[in-house]
Amino acid sequence: MLLATAVVFLPRAVFATDGVPRDGVARDGVARDGVARNDLARDDLTTDDNSRLTVAVGVIETPETVPWRIRFGPGVQQVDSDDYNQVAQLWGYTGFTVAWQGRADVLAPLSQRVRVGARGGVAWSNGGQVNEGQLSLSVWQLGALAEVILSDFPTGSQRNGSGIASLEVGGGVARTSVNLRGESVAGFAPVLWAAARFGFVRRLGGSFWVGAQISPWSDTGPNKLAINLTGIDVGFSAEVMP
Amino acid sequence: MRISMLLVSVPLSMVAQGCCNGDPIVTAEWVESFEGDCSTCGWTFGGDRHTVGAFHPGEHAMRLQPGASMATQFSAAGQPELSLLSQCAAGGTILVEHATRQPLCAAAGPAAVGSSGLAQVRAATDSLPADFDVEQHSLASSVWSRQTIALTLDPGGESESTQPVLLRLSNTGTAACDIDAIHYTATAFGCSGCGSR
């Protein structure tokens, strides 16, 4: 993939040990750092033996990077709503302590180790049932995230698969509603999250993640009691490379 | 909606024999949560009142503005207890009035519900029946809370025969009060008959 015209300064020794002519011309060579550098035209290169630097000016083909991917899966997250629960329990409801969630991420490579993407998610929590009245919390979430891959990630030409570890951070907005007997209280809340992810990727992959989320919401009805979708969350994701 | 109402009469044989077996007998129990299609059935109202959401719009409560009241009547015998889930804005006060008969032993015997003109008692300014004993309790909580009142006025008194009971809740304060989940129970302990305690 031709992405850019670049000026590259490379130590001469790198080429010398990999069979690249000392005139600095590289043709289908692979440098020691594993990055393919192709199609460097002789006319685009100048060599300075004294400085032991090779200066190349031209169009290069960028390294093959991690392809864009889709991942999705279930999780469970902590809900911190002690004040709300304390009141709901007066009527016999249990209140909200955990929420089950489903997420889908679309990720595109920004570099060899950084991916960015978008997230859509939904979460649901059971607040208990009293006299045929079901108290429930539902959350729809949209956000953006960035992920830093800490371990090697298989490239397009190395699709043998490998284990990965990564860190992700993200933020967005949540549409939150509490429902009881056909009546809802709804609002919006900001969402921030961070997570560590461990898994295996190839064309298909899977990962386990554990993280923390902050999402305060206090517009919950006549008493304005806070429901915070704040706390630890864990889950599993399946990952595919289209 | 009145969720349940249980009325159990004390066996006449127990009264006649003056036995005391100690087993608790629930003579009346009901819960009012103001839910459903008949959320105000069985109540008479006076003043400005309307239904509002409690901690959630799907959970309904009765809001009594200052001077408003609600009353109901039923039959019970034995030791009563009232549990009330409510909250008042600053200045609101709920006055609970529990009125019943405690007939003397000589006059003991079942009484019909609705006697003594109970149906006319509605607004806070209405007088309670002259032949009824009345106890009053005041509640004022600025947050939703469930308060249990151990009522001291036993319907039926020592006779433990069911008697008409009138329960009236009035807002005697200066701000609104919301009332939900009223739970009333009356329990006789199987010690029936004068002089058997």
Image (cartoon, coloured by chain):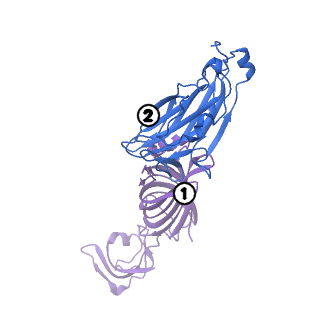
Chain colours: A purple, B blue
Q: Are marks 2 and 1 on the same chain?
A: no
- The answer for how far apart the CA atoms under marks 2 and 1 are is 32 Å
Quarter of image, res B19? top right
Give the numbered dot on residue B138.
2
Q: Mark 2 is on which residue type?
A: Ser
Query: Who's the residue at 42% across and 61% down the image?
Result: A170
Furthest residue in direction right, as rendered: B13
Q: Residues within 10 Å of mark 2 (few under 14, many from 20)?
A: few
User: B105 and B141: which one is in front?
Assistant: B105
* Secondary element at tag 1: strand
On the image, the x and y values in percent for residue B128 come to 52, 34
Residue type highlighted by circle 1: Glu
Circle 1 is placed at which residue position? A183
Is residue B160 or residue B143 the one in the foreground? B160
Counting from the top left corner in percent of width and height, residue B6 is at 67, 35
Callout 1: 10 Å neighbours few (<14), some, many (20+)? some
Residue visible at 53% across and 49% down? B60
